[in-house]
C-alpha cells in the first residue's frame, strides 16, 4: 500500500496540470494499536499535516478518527467491503490507503 501511495504522489508531482508538489510524511505504528493515536497526534499537532491517508483495520481507524475530528483534518481511507459506521461518517474514501501523510 505504501508503494502505491508513493507512486501516486510521484505521478501527481510530475504532472504540471496540478501545479502543486506534495511531500510524504511517513509514520509507522508497527501494527501496535496503542501507537496509532500517538502517531496521529504527532502528524496533526507537531508536523501540522492536514490530510492523512491510512489505517487499514477498523480498530486502528477507531483510534484515530476522534483526533481528526478534533484537529479538523481530512482523513482518507480506502473503502473495503465492510467499513464501520464510525469510519464511514468521519472519513473520506480515497483510491489509496496507507500510512502516508501529505503536507
Image: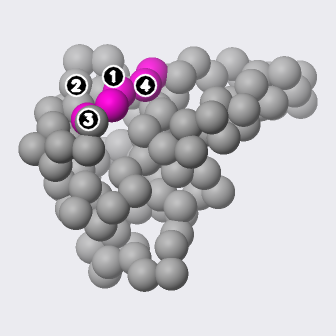
Q: In the image, is residue 46 above or below residue 92?
A: above
- Quote the CA–CA distance across marks 4 and 1: 13 Å
Tell me what residue is drawn at x 80 percent, y 30 percent.
Answer: 11
Which range is magenta?
A: 25-29
Residue 63 location in percent, x, y?
Answer: 17, 54
The residue sitting at 57% across, 18% down in the picture is: 23
- Relative to residue 5, is residue 61 depicted above or below? below
Q: Could you tell me how far apart the alpha carbons at marks 3 and 4 are, in whole angstroms?
A: 10 Å
Across and down, in percent, residue 57 comes to 33, 61
Disc assigned to residue 42: 2
Q: Neighbour class for label 4 at 10 Å: few (<14), some, many (≥20)?
A: some
What's the mark number on residue 99?
none
Total marks placed: 4
Q: How crowded is mark 1: few (under 14 residues within 10 Å), some or many (20 or more)?
A: some
Q: Which of marks 4 and 1 is in front?
A: 4
Is the Cβ of the residue at disc 2 closer than 8 Å to that at disc 3?
A: no
Residue 47 screen position, x and y as percent: 31, 18
Q: Earlier in the sequence, mark 2 or mark 1?
A: 2
Density class for disc 2 (Cα within 10 Å; few <14, some 14-19, many ≥20) is: some
Q: In this view, does 32 lie above or below 14?
A: below
Specify the label residue 29 is tagged with: 3
> Does residue 28 appear anywhere in the picture?
yes
> Which of the numbered marks, if any, corresponds to residue 26?
4
Mark 3 secondary-structure assignment: loop
Does the magenta stretch mainly form a helix, a strand or a loop? loop
Say whether disc 2 or disc 4 marks the residue closer to the N-terminus: 4
| Residue pointed to by mark 1 | 48
Amino acid at each position: 500500500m505504501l508503494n502505491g501511495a508513493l507512486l501516486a504522489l510521484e505521478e501527481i508531482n510530475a504532472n504540471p496540470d496540478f501545479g502543486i508538489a506534495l511531500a510524504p510524511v511517513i509514520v509507522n505504528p508497527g501494527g501496535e494499536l496503542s501507537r496509532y493515536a500517538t502517531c496521529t497526534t504527532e502528524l496533526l499537532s507537531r508536523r501540522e499535516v492536514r490530510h492523512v491517508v491510512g489505517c487499514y483495520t477498523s480498530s486502528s481507524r477507531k483510534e484515530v478518527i476522534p483526533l481528526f475530528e478534533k484537529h479538523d483534518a481530512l482523513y482518507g481511507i480506502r473503502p473495503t467491503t465492510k467499513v464501520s459506521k464510525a469510519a464511514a461518517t468521519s472519513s473520506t474514501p480515497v483510491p489509496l490507503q496507507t500510512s502516508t501523510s501529505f503536507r
